[in-house]
Image (tube, rainbow, N blue to C red):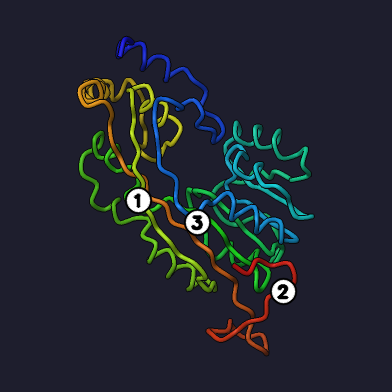
Amino acid sequence: MDRTFDDLVDEAAAVPVDGWDFSWLEGRATEQRPSWGYQRLMSARLARATAALDLQTGGGEVLAEAGAFPPTMVATEAWPPNVAKATRLLHPRGAAVVVHPEQPPLPFADGAFDLVTSRHPAVVEWPEIVRVLAPGGTYFAQHVGPASVFEVTEYFLGPQPEARRKRDPEIESADARAAGLDIVDLRTERLRMEFLDIGAVVYFLRKVIWIVPGFTVDRYRDRLRDMDELIRRDGSFVAHSSRTLFEARKLYPVSGGRGTCGGGRRPTPPGSPTG
């Protein structure tokens, strides 16, 4: 590698990090993709929906790749630079982008959507998801799984035993059931990542801010320099991301309007995803 540590770090520190496009990392970092293909599966469900909500859409890049939107398509986002980017991508296709902080309540009526999607939500408010879903409606999402990229997290912060237990798919699915969802599909995979230069690490940590909360180059310059030496020696820094696929369906009310049904077959409303 011809470029110096300072050149690589200064370049990565100056690059804009709005949106959820990681193309700047091409040739500088690699990450395996989950076997299920979230984009393809989400697109198929959107094509069958009548009203859909994409939570925490980022810059709208993933949603914008869908081949068809339902008649009603809404996306939420909190961070202003991402809101602007999502608006540019999604408004021409008829989707509304709503500015909303990542906390309840969602600004939508009960039962407004037959499909709610999300890719890598920072927070998951199960009661609100259930509230805005119509009975029989589907939540389809790809979550960040447990201990994702923790090789990087713990390189900078040291051991994080409590944080390692967060995002457990069994705990998340139990919370989803408690809120009134029936789990249709639940899968988790760990996937190899490689950072090929220290600039890629800096860019990644500036963009994915929960990996090392409070990260700045100045704060961690000495540790970055140590990692740069490791990458030059070994060729890369290896980590592993963790991803969980969720599909869950809102239970129908029990006849008489009390509670939700706890089992058995439930009719599927027209237009709702079935797989």
The answer for how far apart the CA atoms under marks 3 and 1 are is: 21 Å
Q: Amino acid at mark 1?
A: Arg
- Residue 261 is situated, as x and y percent measured from the top left of the image, at 57, 84
Instruction: Give SS at disc 2.
Output: loop
| Image coordinates for residue 219, horizontal then vertical, percent | 30, 24
Q: Image height check: is 191 above or below 5?
A: below
Q: Which residue is depicted at the point 43% across and 36% down?
A: 208
Residue matched to label 1: 190
Q: Measuring 61% from the left and 38% from the top, which residue is drawn there?
A: 61
**N-terminal of the two: label 3 or label 2?**
3
Marks 3 & 2, CB-CB < 8 Å contact: no
All told, the count of numbered labels is 3
Q: Residue at x 52, y 51 (%)?
A: 37
How packed is label 1: few (under 14 Cα within 10 Å), some, or many (20 or more)?
Answer: some
Tell me where residue 4 appears, x and y as whole percent. Answer: 30, 10
Q: Secondary structure beneath disc 3?
A: loop
Q: Which residue is mark 2?
A: 269
SS class, disc 1: strand
Image quarter in which the C terminus is found:
bottom right
Residue 94 lies, with reference to residue 207, above or below; the image says below
Find the distance from the CA under tag 3 to the CA under tag 2.
25 Å
The residue identified by callout 3 is 124
**Which kind of residue does numbered mark 2 sit on?**
Pro
> Amino acid under label 3?
Val
Find the distance from the CA under tag 2 to the CA under tag 1.
Answer: 35 Å
Toward the bottom, the furthest residue is: 256
Residue 108 vertical position relative to residue 274 in the rendered view, above or below: above
